[in-house]
């Protein structure tokens, strides 16, 4: 079967559509303004997966030079468990590495087993915890890090 998703870089013009998808995916969603501000910030970026009429998923990132953060990943409920998030994260990681990023960090709700599996599959490992980092509901965040590729680690 032909792959229905088209993955492309995100831009500030996507903010309203991404916020709409975000509201379907998170109990404490980002606003359209938060998406716009991040995508307009130097170093802010990400990728959108399109399917038919609107976005099926996205990943949002912040590149700070040698270090970057994965800010958010979401896939619409009807497109889950088809490895779309895996593709989006792989695309973001490859893009950031291409820009010179060596290590990446992110936070994830401790109870979010699906996201933890996604990130651990993408090379992230647990390095810490932020107590009561999230609201609605309050929950600890696990902090994950993706270390530099082995060939670079020694340099
Ligand atoms: C988490 C989320 C992005 C995963 O999207 P997805 O496209 O369904 O994920 P994928 O199909 O790419 O799955 C990637 C891996 O995670 C696993 N996984 C995904 N969701 C899972 C779940 N609910 N339970 C267990 N494993 C899960 C998959 O089996 C797959 O594992 P594999 O690589 O070993 O086969 C999606 O469920 C979502 O949008 N959730 C709400 C928002 C959210 O929690 N985002 C992350 C915040 S940090």
Image (cartoon, rainbow, N blue to C red):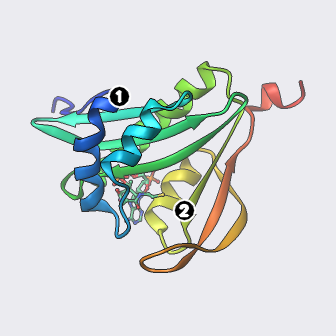
Q: Is residue 131 above or below residue 13?
A: below
Q: Is residue 143 above or below residue 91?
A: below
Q: Position of residue 77 (x, y in %)?
A: 23, 58
Tell me if residue 83 can be seen.
Answer: no
Foreground: 124 or 3? 124
Q: Quadrant of the C terminus?
A: top right
Which of discs 2 and 1 lies nearer the camera? The answer is: 1
**Is the CB of mark 2 within 8 Å of ligand 1?**
yes
Q: Position of residue 78 (x, y in %)?
A: 18, 55
Q: Is residue 126 above or below residue 149?
A: below
The label shown at residue 108 is 2
In the figure, is residue 70 to the left or right of 47?
right
Residue located at (49% from left, 35% from top): 90
The label shown at residue 125 is none
**Would you call the spot at circle 1 few (<14 residues within 10 Å), some (14-19), or many (20 or more)?**
some
Report if the CB atoms under discs 2 and 1 are less than 8 Å apart. Answer: no
Name which of mark 2 and mark 1 comes first in the sequence: 1
Residue located at (51% from left, 80% from top): 138
Q: Position of residue 132 (x, y in %)?
A: 60, 77
**Would you call the spot at circle 2 few (<14 residues within 10 Å), some (14-19), or many (20 or more)?**
many
The label shown at residue 11 is 1
Secondary structure at numbered mark 1: loop
Secondary structure at numbered mark 2: strand
């Amino acid at each position: 079967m032909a792959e229905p998703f088209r993955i492309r870089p995100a831009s500030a013009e996507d903010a309203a559509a991404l916020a709409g998808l975000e509201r379907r995916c998170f109990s404490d969603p980002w606003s359209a303004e938060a998406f716009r501000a991040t995508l307009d910030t130097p170093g802010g970026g990400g990728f959108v997966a399109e399917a038919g009429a609107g976005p099926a998923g996205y990943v949002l990132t912040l590149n700070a030079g040698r270090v970057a953060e994965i800010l958010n990943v979401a896939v619409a409920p009807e497109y889950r468990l088809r490895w779309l998030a895996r593709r989006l994260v792989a695309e973001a990681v490859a893009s950031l590495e291409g820009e010179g990023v060596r290590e990446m960090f992110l936070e994830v709700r401790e109870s979010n087993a699906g996201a933890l599996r996604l990130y651990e599959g993408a090379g992230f490992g647990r390095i810490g915890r932020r107590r009561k980092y999230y609201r609605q509901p309050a929950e600890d965040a696990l902090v994950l890090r993706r270390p530099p590729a082995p060939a670079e680690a020694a340099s």
